[in-house]
Image (cartoon, rainbow, N blue to C red):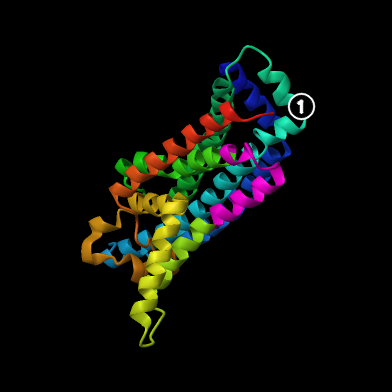
Amino acid sequence: MIAVWMLTWKELLRKKVTLMTLLLTVLFWIAFYFIAKSAGATAAQSESGIISLNDLVERFRGSAILLWIGFFFGAFATGFLSIFSSVAAVAGEAEHGVLQSVLARPIPRTHWYLGRWLGFVTFCLAYALLLFVSILIIVIYATGVHPDWSGLVPAFMLFISPVLIMVTLTMLASCWLAPLGNGVAMVMLFGMGWLGTMLDKVIAARMFTTDDASTTSDTLEIVSGLIRLIIPTDALQQRMLSELFRVDELGETFSSRDSLGYFSVVNPPSDAFLYYTAVYFLIFLAAGLFAIRRKDF
């Protein structure tokens, strides 16, 4: 299993998707640095000898918006890397005849599957760690606002959890779908998670003012809840931002929806939802192990 894990890393380091991801990440760092620097300079110009509470809240607001932008790209990059790195994990190997030669050796199929899964997951987690740390460093350097250090560990754990889910779902789907079809299906599923969050923002903004506004909001809330249950990735992103911002500790001084607008954290999931996500992940990982054992190649 460890040998398969290491071979997966070597394979990923040679893939063009890794090179493109790194190039786009460098471009993002450059653009994000200048955006953050501009926002930090604007905040610094408003400083006087004594910083008032309003100034502190305004600096926090600017830092929160920058973190939202940074981690929006982070969720996009880690999600897509998770999908396209593992999209051909099973069916793609079988099409090229590689899987048949490997499974002919005295190695259990489940060990091979877990080795591939660990390779994809650890590779994407290494990239996620690099991205998480770099975004925080750029924002702290530009704005001077330090996050609550006690919230960094739970925030990072929530940031990387979609990687585990997307790799698990992509490898499971790869047992039946060709790489192209699998990639399209997983991208659409991943995008569905964003749709759920957008519906929550529409509900929170009270955009419907008709007589049936209450019914419409209830319908949107049901649809949003179902989307979160089907694909919980973006809901975990909202919980991560909530842990990072610690908005609830500011009480009435700071309203996330009013102060951050579109960048607000809407309806972060509860602890019960995190337990559901853990069960969700284990079920689909076990389904993948079961499928690889029963699959005919």
- Judged from this view, the residue extending furthest toward the right is 96
* Identity of the residue drawn at 57% across and 17% down: 108
Residue 48: tell me if it is visible: no
The quarter of the picture where the C terminus appears is top right
- Judged from this view, the residue extending furthest toward the left is 251
| Residue 148 or residue 203, whichever sits in front | 203
Q: Which residue is mark 1?
A: 97
| Residue 9 or residue 129, whichever sits in front | 9
Label 1, residues with CA under 10 Å away: few <14, some 14-19, many ≥20: few
Number of marks in picture: 1
Q: Quadrant location of residue 257? A: bottom left
Q: Up-down: is 48 above or below 152? A: below
At mark 1, the secondary structure is loop
Give, as a single range, the part of the protein colored magenta. 171-191
Q: Is 190 within the magenta?
A: yes
- Judged from this view, the residue extending furthest toward the bottom is 211
* Identity of the residue drawn at 51% across and 41% down: 163
